[in-house]
């Protein structure tokens, strides 16, 4: 039996592509062409992860309701700016721990430190992980390296490295990149994503962004379990 098998290659490719899509959707407002493509895209098969499947279901409900792509793009742009940047949109829906926040700012340091300030130790740790992997995130309109779009882009980058190593049948490189993926998702994305989800759901006006953050948390849980199952060796 040849290693790697096609299943390992397909899994790495799917993971890379999924992280890329999530990173793009959190990075900036949805463009007209992107929204049109999402509306026409087929629904994925159920994964068995409740958060992921229900989150995608909310996104699909929104996409299926779009009758005019331009109006839908405008509505999502308004919701993105209100939810993640703190301006535009309708009246606030926040309550509880979100009441003192002007938006669901998508930076790890805010949720990990509890200070509601961007930067600091957590952002520095994320930056160090990037430097060690020779990764440079795209920082357009982004204030710090611990923005969720950058962290998801880093996971996309690592999954692409894994795919390259698998294609080269380099077992040592595969093990090394999988250890890096597992370490980053456990140390950085998983610890703050659930709190971020709760704040997004307080602010977001559309099922699209409510579903996106729910789906993302489900995906991270699922991917962490997958990476943990690979610990101790390659498939």
Image (cartoon, rainbow, N blue to C red):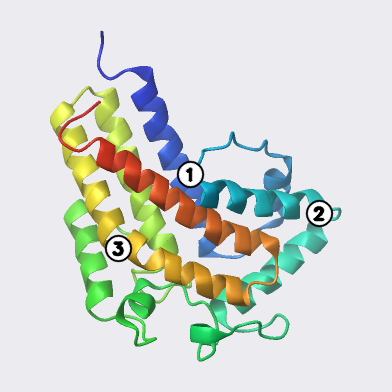
Q: Furthest residue to the right?
A: 67
Residue 85 vs residue 182, the one in the foreground: 182
Give me the disc on residue 66: 2
Seen in the picture, residue 89 relative to 180 is either above or below; the reply is: below
- Camera-side mark, 1 or 3: 3
Residue 104 visible, this angle: yes
**Mark 1 touching mark 3, by CB under 8 A?**
no
How far is disc 3 from disc 2 in space, using C-alphas? 35 Å
Q: How far apart are the alpha carbons under marks 1 and 3? A: 18 Å
In the rendered structure, which disc, 2 or 1, sits on the residue that comes first in sequence?
A: 1
Mark 3 vs mark 2, foreground winner is 3
Q: Are marks 2 and 1 in contact (CB under 8 Å)?
A: no
In the drawing, what numbered circle is on residue 18?
A: 1
Q: Which quadrant of the structure image shows residue 71?
A: bottom right
Q: Nearer the viewer, residue 235 or 127?
A: 235
- Residue 227 point in image, percent of width and height: 29, 41
Where in the figure is residue 85, as x and y percent of width and height? 55, 79
Label 2: element kind = loop
| Secondary structure of residue under mark 1 | helix
Measured as percent of width and height from the top left, residue 34 is found at 66, 50
Answer few, some or many: residues within 10 Å of disc 1's Cα (few below 14, many 20 plus, some between 14 and 19).
some
Query: Which of the two labelled residues, at mark 1 and mark 3, occupies the earlier sequence position?
Result: 1
Residue ID for mark 3: 188
């Amino acid at each position: 039996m040849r290693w790697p098998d096609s299943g390992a290659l397909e899994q790495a490719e799917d993971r890379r592509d999924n992280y890329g899509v999530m990173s793009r959707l959190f990075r900036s407002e949805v463009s007209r062409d992107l929204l049109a493509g999402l509306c026409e895209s087929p629904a994925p098969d159920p994964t068995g992860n409740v958060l992921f499947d229900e989150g995608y279901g909310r996104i699909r409900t929104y996409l299926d309701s779009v009758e005019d792509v331009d109006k839908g793009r405008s509505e999502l742009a308004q919701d993105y700016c209100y939810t993640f940047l703190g301006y535009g949109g309708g009246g606030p829906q926040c309550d509880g721990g979100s009441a003192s926040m002007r938006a669901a700012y998508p930076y790890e340091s805010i949720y990990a430190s509890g200070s509601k300030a961007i930067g600091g130790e957590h952002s520095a740790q994320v930056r160090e992980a990037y430097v060690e992997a020779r990764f440079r995130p795209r920082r357009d309109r982004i204030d710090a390296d611990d923005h969720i779009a950058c962290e998801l882009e880093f996971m996309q980058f690592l999954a692409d490295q894994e795919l390259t190593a698998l294609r080269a049948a380099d077992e040592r490189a595969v093990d090394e990149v999988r250890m890096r993926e597992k370490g980053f998702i456990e140390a950085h994305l998983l610890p703050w994503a659930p709190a971020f989800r709760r704040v997004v759901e307080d602010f977001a006006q559309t099922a699209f962004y409510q579903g996106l953050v729910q789906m993302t948390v489900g995906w991270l849980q699922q991917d962490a379990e997958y990476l943990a199952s690979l610990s101790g060796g390659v498939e």
